[in-house]
Amino acid sequence: PTQAQRVLEYMRQFGSITQLDALRDLSVMRLASRISDLRRDGYDIVSNTEAVKNRYGETCHIKRYRERVTE
């Protein structure tokens, strides 16, 4: 499977994906590019920004992507 297909399957299995998930679990370095590929292919991928703490206790903002499933 392509990296984009792996990203899509990951979102379907776990509900969402972040850059850290993509790097750690899929070895995908450019998640935003793979999300762009999926959107171009017609998948409805939405994102939200979350505030998280880094190892130094500083607030950082990350993107979490998920596939919007319409019934």
Image (cartoon, rainbow, N blue to C red):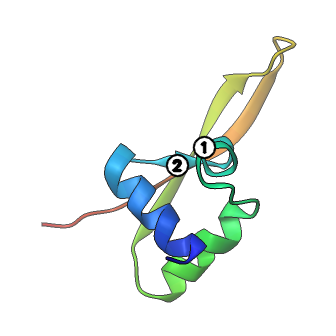
Can you name the residue that lies furthest to the right here? 56
**x%, y% of residue 62?**
68, 41
Amino acid beneath label 1: Asp
Mark 1: few, some, or many residues within 10 Å (few <14, many ≥20)?
Answer: some
Q: Quadrant of the C terminus?
A: bottom left
**x%, y% of residue 59?**
78, 22
SS at mark 1 in the image: helix
Q: Residue at x 60, y 43 (%)?
A: 21
Reading the image, the residue beneath label 2 is 17
| Vertical position of residue 11 compared to residue 30: above or below | above
Residue 20 quadrant: top right
- Residue 21's tag is 1
Residue 10 quadrant: bottom left
Q: Residue at x 33, y 62 (%)?
A: 68
Judged left or right of residue 59, residue 51 is: left
Amino acid beneath label 2: Ile
Disc 2 to disc 1: CB gap under 8 Å? yes
| Vertical position of residue 59 compared to residue 50: above or below | above
- Residue 42's tag is none
